[in-house]
Amino acid sequence: MTALSTVDRPTGDDTISRGPVRRLSSWLHRHSGIRLAGLLSAPLLWLLVAYLGSLAVLFVSAFWTVNSFTGDLVRQPTLANFRTILTEEVYRTVALRSLGVAAAVTVIDVLIALPMAFFMAKVASPRSRRILVIAILTPLWASYLVKAYAWRVMLANGGPVDWLFGGPGNGPGYGLPAIVLVLSYLWLPYMILPIYAGLERLPDSLLEASADLGGRARRTFRSVVLPMIVPSVIAGTIFTFSLSLGDYITVQIVGGKTQLIGNLVYANIGAANNLPFSAALATIPVLIMVVYLFAVRRSGALEEL
C-alpha cells in the first residue's frame, strides 16, 4: 500500500510542469474574449492570407500592363486596362450579357424553388420531406463536369432535347439559352435549400389564421408567406447570381460561340498571356457582388446563409 501511494503521488516536477498550464487555463477561462480570439486566430489568418490576400493581389495586378514586344509584366500603375474595358464595346457587351445571364438564372431558380420548397416544408409528410431533401442534395454529390457534359449530350443535335421539341434541330442547341438552362439546373439546389429552411421556421399558425380570416391560398402566399421568406429568397439569389456571374466552364461546354466574363478572363490568362487585363476583367463580377451584398445586407439575408 505504501508503494502504491508513493507511485500515485505527483512528484515535484509534475506539480511544477502542470502549474503554469493550470494557471493559463484559469486565466483564459476568466477572459472569454481572449479565449475566443485565440480560437478564431488561425481561421481568420487563413482567410486574411488566402482570400483577402488574393483579392488584394488581383486588384493591384489589374493596374499593371504587359509589354507588347517582350511579353514581360510592367509593374507601373496605370488605368489602361480599365480604360480599354470601358471604351471597347465588346467588353461592355460581354459584361451586360453576363449580368443578364446571372439575372435570368436567378429568376428561373426562384420561380422553380418557391413551390418546391413550400411543398416540402408545409405539404409533404415527414417521410416524404426527408426523401425530397435527399433527392435535392443528391445532384450536389455528382461532379460539376459530369453534369455539364451530360447536358451537352442532351442538347446535342438529334439529342433528347431535340426530340422533345419535335425532332433534330428543333431544340435550343448550344448557345445562350443552353447556358441559362444548364446553369439554372446546376445552381437550383442552392436556391431551394435556403427557402426551405425559411419556410420550416414559418409557424403553421400564421397560415391557419389566414385561412380563418377567409384568405385563399394565393392571397395567403402573397400576403403572409412571401414577406416572411424574403430574406431566405435573397440568400438563395446570392448563391445563384454570384456562381452564374463568374462561371466559364459551362459556357465552354454548351455555350457554342457565346462569350461571358469568365471566358474572357480564362482566354487572357491562357492564350493571350495577359494576366493584368484578366485581373481587370475579374474585378467586374467582384465589384458587382460587393454592391449587391451591400444592397441586401439590411434585409437579413446574410443571416440566412
Image (cartoon, rainbow, N blue to C red):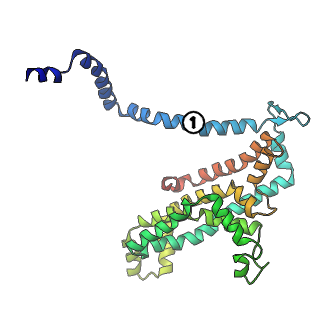
Residue 207 locus on image (x, y percent): 41, 75
Give the vertical position of 214 relative to 191 (above or below). Answer: below
Q: Of residues 273 and 236, which is closer to you in this image?
A: 273
Q: In screen coordinates, is 42 left or right of 295?
A: left
Residue 214 locus on image (x, y percent): 42, 83
Residue 224 appears in the picture as rendered = no
Residue 248 locus on image (x, y percent): 72, 55
Q: Of residues 260 and 169, which is closer to you in this image?
A: 169
Q: Quadrant of residue 153?
A: bottom right
Secondary element under disc 1, as helix, strand or loop, is helix
* Residue shown at the point (60%, 62%) measured from the top left: 187
Q: Residue furthest left?
A: 1
Q: Residue furthest top?
A: 12
Q: Which residue is mark 1?
A: 48
* Residue shown at the point (72%, 81%) measured from the top left: 163
User: Quarter holding the N terminus?
Assistant: top left
* Residue shown at the point (52%, 72%) measured from the top left: 116
Residue 58 locus on image (x, y percent): 70, 39
Q: Of residues 199 and 253, which is closer to you in this image?
A: 253
> Which amino acid type is marked by label 1?
Leu
Q: Quadrant of residue 173?
A: bottom right
